[in-house]
Image (cartoon, rainbow, N blue to C red):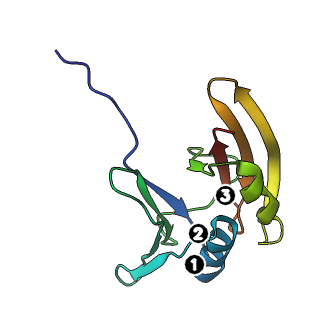
Amino acid sequence: MDQKEASATWFEIPVTDMSRAVTFYEQIFQISMHTMQMGDDLEMALFPRGEHKTGGSLIRNPDFYHPSNTQGPLIYLNANPDLKQVENRVEAAGGKITIHKRQISPEFGYMAVIEDTEGNRVALFSEN
């Protein structure tokens, strides 16, 4: 049997206030997000993605998605070339820094953990 690679293809970050969350992520990553209404109680805002890259969104549905800064998966978002640039915008955008930039190892790069405006813990990653 051939060994298959298991890799992430999509992620969803739960939010309670879509407008506030979109503003936060657009500010810290300096991006534009596309917002969509997906039914009566489901909203999404898509992170931009290039060809062959993992996609993801902010998502609001009060019955199914619940922000958490202590439970659930920890998502690492790409903050290359240097996550310190993104980290420096977190507090001004309304978030908190839980773990400041630190080296994972020389071969694996750097990480930090932030709390977004919705109360989610989210990790940042960069090679430098």
Q: Which mark is residue 128?
A: none
Q: Quadrant of residue 48?
A: bottom left
Residue toward you, 85 or 7 = 85
Disc 2 is placed on an element classified as: loop
Residue ID for mark 3? 120
The single residue placed furthest to the left in the displayed view is: 1
Residue ID for mark 1? 18
Residue ID for mark 2? 15
Evaluate if marks 2 and 3 touch, with contact meaning CB atoms under 8 Å apart.
Answer: yes
Binning the other alpha carbons within 10 Å of mark 3 as few (below 14), some (14 to 19) or many (20 upward) gives many
Q: How many marks?
A: 3
- The CA distance from mark 2 to mark 3 is 8 Å
Evaluate if marks 1 and 2 touch, with contact meaning CB atoms under 8 Å apart.
Answer: yes
In the rendered image, the vertical position of residue 75 relative to residue 6, given as above or below: below
Amino acid type of the residue that numbered disc 1 sits on in the rendered structure: Met
Amino acid type of the residue that numbered disc 3 sits on in the rendered structure: Asn
Residue toward you, 128 or 46 = 128
Q: Quadrant of residue 110?
A: top right
Q: Residue at x 66, y 33 (%)?
A: 109
Amino acid type of the residue that numbered disc 2 sits on in the rendered structure: Val
Disc 1 is placed on an element classified as: helix
- The CA distance from mark 1 to mark 2 is 6 Å
In the rendered image, the vertical position of residue 16 relative to residue 110, given as above or below: below
Q: Position of residue 13 (x, y in %)?
A: 54, 60
Q: Position of residue 57 (x, y in %)?
A: 47, 64
Q: Residue at x 34, y 81 (%)?
A: 39
Binning the other alpha carbons within 10 Å of mark 1 as few (below 14), some (14 to 19) or many (20 upward) gives some
Q: Position of residue 79 (x, y in %)?
A: 63, 52
Q: Residue at x 57, y 50 (%)?
A: 78
